[in-house]
Amino acid sequence: MKKIIFTEKAPAPIGPYNQAVLKGNTLYTSGQIALDPDTGNLVMDSIEAETQQVMKNMEAVLEAAGMTFENVVKTTIFIMDMNDFARINTIYASYFNEKTAPARETVQVACLPKNVNVEISMIAIL
């Protein structure tokens, strides 16, 4: 049976999905964008600030499932402009130990929800 993961420390879902689903020992997260869960406003002062908020949101979801970034085995990064990759990667990398970092793909897309510049989803295992 699956367990729905929810925390008020990350943005609430705005559609027919959940922040994350735990099935067995595997956590599947929905994509997080740079919504501040306290204000509901987007954090888009810079690509670095935007990515930082995305990672804070993801950290809150992982914590709600009793996990940390060390549990993450796979990430997907969707970005609007591949020219932002290096700046996004610098913030992203600060959350992982390079020697145990997860597998990852990064994809440039035509559009993201609320016209954000970055969205990240993860798979983690207990």
Image: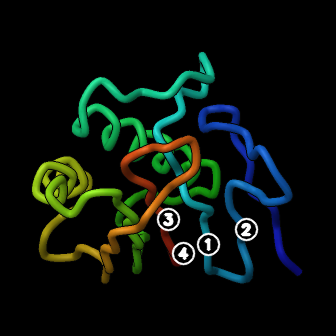
Q: Earlier in the sequence, mark 3 or mark 1?
A: 1
Q: Residue at x 60, y 28 (%)?
A: 37
Residue 52 rendering spot, x and y as whole percentages: 31, 38
| Real-space Cα separation, disc 1 to disc 2, in angstroms | 6 Å
What count of labels does the image hold? 4
Q: Secondary structure at mark 1?
A: strand
Up-down relation of residue 73 to residue 11 (above or below): below
Confirm or deny contact between disc 1 and disc 2 (CB under 8 A): yes
Choose mark 4 or mark 3, whichever is in front: 3
Furthest residue toward front: 110
Residue position marked by numbered label 1 in the rendering: 27
Q: Earlier in the sequence, mark 2 or mark 4?
A: 2
Up-down relation of residue 44 to residue 57 (above or below): above
Furthest residue toward top: 39
Residue position marked by numbered label 3 in the rendering: 121
Q: Which amino acid lies under the numbered mark 1 shown in the image of this protein?
A: Leu
| Real-space Cα separation, disc 4 to disc 3, in angstroms | 17 Å
Residue position marked by numbered label 2 in the rendering: 21
Q: Residue at x 41, y 27 (%)?
A: 43
Q: Earlier in the sequence, mark 2 or mark 3?
A: 2
Q: Which amino acid lies under the numbered mark 2 shown in the image of this protein?
A: Val
Q: Secondary structure at mark 2?
A: strand
Q: Which amino acid lies under the numbered mark 4 shown in the image of this protein?
A: Leu
